[in-house]
Image (cartoon, helix red, strand yellow):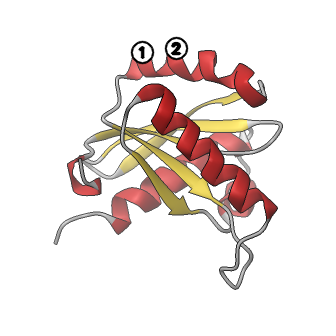
Amino acid sequence: MNAHDAQCALAFDFGLKRIGVASGSRWGGTASPLTTLKESGKAVFPAIEKLLLVWQPDALVVGVPRHPDGAPHAMTAAALKFAASLRGRFHKPVFEVDERYTSVEAQSLGARDVDAVAAALILEQFFRETSTP
């Protein structure tokens, strides 16, 4: 599956202590914040599995943080490892999106659940970047 084929997706704003989750559809290019998972490490995967069973997404999208100049940092590697774990565990296409400033934008919107709103912003960015003309 390529990015254009993903009609329904779940997005993740990865963090070591929390992971924001959003769902969305390419139809309309919109996403909605779902929840923030507070499990960490391997303990997060059963919660993700439950979300996959409920939402049945075509694909998963992971926000990958970088420095403002685009250079990777420690969280970049952790997010990429998380994306690889999702691929291996759930056998779904996983797409990575540059997520610089999504948490800052979510905070500026006055979001109560900053992590889930950041995940929605990541997913909307994915839809914009992969839309067909």
Which quarter of the rendered picture does the C terminus lie within? bottom left
Of the pair 91 and 110, the residue shown nearer to us: 91
Label 2, label 1: how far apart the Cα atoms are: 6 Å
SS for tag 2? Answer: helix
Query: Could you tell me if the residues under marks 2 and 1 are in contact, i.e. CB atoms within 8 Å?
Result: yes
Residue drawn at (71%, 25%) of the image = 42
Residue drawn at (26%, 63%) of the image = 131
Residue drawn at (77%, 68%) of the image = 73
Position of 55 relative to 65 (above/below): above
Visible residue check, residue 87: yes
Q: Position of residue 104 (x, y in %)?
A: 74, 62
Marker disc for residue 46: none
Of the pair 54 and 72, the residue shown nearer to us: 72
Visible residue check, residue 108: no
SS for tag 1? Answer: helix
Residue drawn at (44%, 55%) of the image = 124
Q: Position of residue 123 (x, y in %)?
A: 46, 51
- Residue 57: image quadrant is top left
Which residue is disc 2 drawn over? Answer: 50
Position of 100 relative to 52 (above/below): below
Which residue is disc 1 drawn over? Answer: 54
Q: Amino acid at mark 2?
A: Lys
